[in-house]
Amino acid sequence: MKITFLGTGTSQGVPVIACDCEVCLSEDPHDKRLRTSLLVESDETTLLIDAGPDFRQQMLRENVMRVDSIILTHEHKDHIAGLDDVRAFNYKSQDAIDIYAEERVLKAIRKEYSYVFAEYQYPGIPRMRLNTISEYGFNINGIPIIPIRVFHYRLAVYGFRIGNFAYITDANYIPEESKEKLFGVKYLVVNALRKEKHISHFSLREAVDLIREISPRRSFITHMSHQMGLHNKVSAELPPDIIMAWDGLSVICK
Ligand SMILES: [Zn+2]
Ligand SMILES: [Zn+2]
Ligand SMILES: [Zn+2]
């Protein structure tokens, strides 16, 4: 299985509009962060975790030729705003795209994209097949996906475990029973917004503490704000098994 970081930035992306901090002005490509999303490719299927406002740009940059399904962590705009652009994949496959999320998130999708679910449909609109998921897990083309309940301040969000890999974004609290589902992973992606504490995201220290508790072989930090600091500076402060992810980074999970 191969994972590719399509975006590693928080909701505003990096650079932030109209910001003149050193990170936003940096010319290092590692400091350009589109909104957080992940591509997962295996022999069986190609899927995405989240489809934010940069979806189109991410598909073009990575030359993605097909997407079978999109799994959603939660309904915040930086994770769902790109769904209108699934039209290109609908056209190519001549089929609707499968969207997997919990009922609350699907309700938000039906509201945000009301024209997709309207009784009288305008020609050329995106086509989505909504699939409700629960903590008991589900399969995509034979690949078992295990949802992991995490909390984003008070909002319940799903992380996902796929084999020896797990992905947790937009969380600042993980209940003990959810940690049980994370033990044994070799590759862990976890969100950290910045070094300072935040109300709804892990700080870098909190993410590192979680990584030490789960102890995977390699870990990756994502969903970063410009307040995290320059990529080359912060990366150098991290232990070698913890990588500050960047847009375009691919990892083979074996
Ligand atoms: Zn987010
Ligand atoms: Zn900035
Ligand atoms: Zn969020």
Image (tube, rainbow, N blue to C red):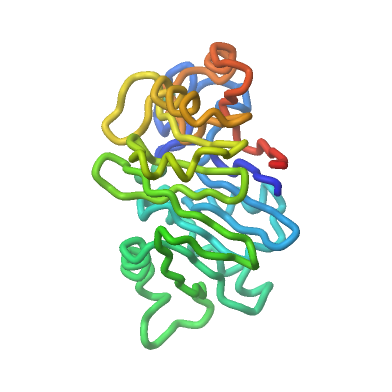
With 167 as the anchor, is 121 left or right in this view?
left
State which quarter of the image contains the C terminus: top right
Q: In this view, does 27 lie above or below 143?
A: above
Q: Which residue lies furthest to the bottom in this view?
A: 120
Residue found at x 52% / y 16%: 234
Q: In this view, does 222 lie above or below 75?
A: above
Residue found at x 50% / y 31%: 214
Q: Residue furthest right?
A: 43
Residue found at x 53% / y 34%: 33
User: Residue 153 placed where, x, y %?
Assistant: 26, 39
**Residue 201 figure quarter:** top left
User: Residue 78 placed where, x, y %?
Assistant: 41, 48
With 180 as the anchor, is 63 left or right in this view?
right
Nearer to me, 108 or 253: 253
Q: Is residue 213 above or below residue 110?
A: above
**Residue 7 figure quarter:** top right
Residue found at x 53% / y 37%: 189
Quadrant containing ligand 1: top left
Numbered disc total: 0
User: Residue 228 placed where, x, y %?
Assistant: 44, 22
User: Residue 95 placed where, x, y %?
Assistant: 61, 78
